[in-house]
Image (spheres, rainbow, N blue to C red):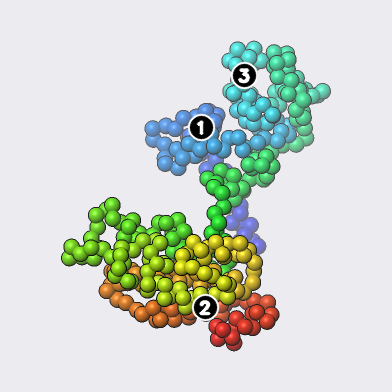
Amino acid sequence: MKLVHFDILCASSVREYRLRLSWIHSYRLRRNNFWLVKPAADSSWGWRKILSIRNTIRPHIIHQVGDGRNTSVLYDIWCDYGPLVEILTNRETHRAAISIDSNVSQFVNDSGWSWPDVLSTKYPLLLSTDPPDIGKDDVVRWRDVDGVLHCFSVSKVWDTIRYRQPKVLWYSVIWFAQNIPRHAFIAWLLMKQKLKTQDMLKPWDMNLNGNGGVAVCTLCQLQPDSNTHLFFECMYASRVWDQVKQLIQIPISGNCWQVFVQLLAPITHRRVSRVVVAKLLFAASIYFIWQERNARLFSNKSRTSDLLFQNIFSTVRYKLLSLRFKDSVQVRQLKMLWKIT
């Protein structure tokens, strides 16, 4: 019964796809080529977005010619020259009798290619391209950044056209399979220097202390908070980190979150218990310090550094209870330390 429902769903999706495609050809393209059509004044936002990315996706859409009936001679990429419309002059297309609707099959005969002399002489790669196979249909492939052809998939398209930057040092410190998402998000904002601390809000001329007072760190009351001060330089935060470092079974010296990242980053690829615990503690400490700062600032509530550490400990412990590690001496020691039976 489930298989029947799946077949019905697939058939329904195919019918809907074909209806949408027919509608686009009838009302959007109106016999125009997709690569040439301009958005009408009444075009929807979605249709305009599709047309706006044509220059981005065009080099990646490759036609593997079968019988050539569904491949445009001028506008599709099917040979090493790319779209022929970009290299042929108007005089050459006219003399070769190529129109906007011409397909590749029109230039094939029983013995292979039948290009007009005006093209075969000037563009010899047209003759060296594998001739169409009359017994096969044309196939459209997606070419990735490495030039490899794939069957179309959304993941391949996204991975090809997405904005790329070099992988940052702290990537695996924050994003890993066992992370706590809300902790990882706040830690990510810290790494990007995007947390709205007082130094970030100063240009907005916001009075965060009220009554015309000077804005200072709500944890230590000594100086304005910042991404650097709040998470290590602050006396309150330092007391928390001193306790956290006793649980991190990796030697760490210095009170600076950059030092933590530099020490953790080279070993974060190791799937061992102490590394996972260190990363969980790092993100949890950042999260709860930020939470405490906001509670004092906006709700006038406060906790001692010892109580905050206990919250960090219990949260990470609950997470460890849900994880499974391969039994070893190190894992047994970890369970004793975290009171996990």
Which disc is residue 50 wearing?
none
Image coordinates of residue 252 in percent, x first then y, are 54, 70
CA distance separating discs 2 and 1:
67 Å
CA distance separating discs 2 and 3:
71 Å
Q: Residues within 10 Å of mark 2 (few under 14, many from 20)?
A: few
Q: Amino acid at mark 2?
A: Gln
Which residue position is annotated with label 2?
246
Q: Nearer the viewer, residue 74 or 1?
A: 74
Q: Amino acid at mark 1?
A: Leu
Image coordinates of residue 280 in percent, x first then y, are 52, 71
- On screen, 91 above or below 38? above
Q: Earlier in the sequence, mark 1 or mark 3?
A: 1
Tag in front: 2 or 3: 2
Mark 2 element type: helix
Q: Is residue 340 visible?
A: no
Which residue position is annotated with label 3?
88
Q: Nearer the viewer, residue 223 or 328?
A: 223
